[in-house]
Image (cartoon, grey):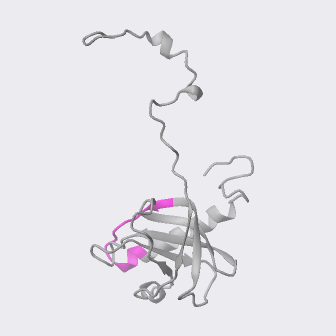
Amino acid sequence: MRANEHIEVSADHTSDIPFWQYRPATPVPPKRFKTVSGVVVPGAQLGRTIGFPTANMVLDQHVELDAGIYAVRFTRASGECHGGVASFGRRPTVVENGELILETYVLDFADDLYGETCSVRFIKFLRSELRFDGLEPMIEQIRKDVVLARGVLATENPSGTVGMSGEGGT
């Protein structure tokens, strides 16, 4: 084909392609949630004072993970596993230009985790990171996030997908 030439394509030809066979010219790989590990480090203790103590981990700044709130599985070095709600981001409500940090509220758990190497498996993205107009609106949203995460984790299949058996969706 030479410059200034064009090919005419009839709409009849494009409609012959079933929608499930359509593939974009450049395939976009699906975003996969993953498991990250790290040492639990002390934080500012704000989570503890508002009723949601968190296990804090500083991750590689190049981790491929969207900032936001997730339903997660939190696993201790011993293999003990708990559900959780994780926040990955810069904590815009409480810190100006904060570093990326992973904070996990471990459901139904109260032990000390400082210095322990733990892992967090991301099950489902719940929402984007938000900046709240104070602690009270943030606390109210955390309560909602906990309820939502419990529901998500209750429907998690052994394969790690969320939904009813056979659905396979996340």
What residue do we see at 51% from left, 16% from top? 15
137 lies left or right of 79:
left
Seen at 47% across and 85% down, the residue is: 41
Q: Residue furthest left?
A: 4
> Where's residue 1, x and y in %?
34, 11
Q: Is residue 106 above or below residue 125?
A: below
In the image: residue 119, left or right of residue 133: right
In the depicted view, which residue is nearer to us: 170 or 49? 170
Q: Which residues are magenta?
A: 126-138
Is residue 85 placed above or below 164 in the rendered structure?
below
Q: Is residue 35 above or below residue 108?
A: above
Q: Determine the residue positioned at 48% across, 16% down.
A: 14
- Residue 52 visible in image: no
Residue 92 drawn at (x, y percent): 33, 72
The answer to if 114 sits in the magenta stretch is no
| 167 to 160, vertically: above or below | above
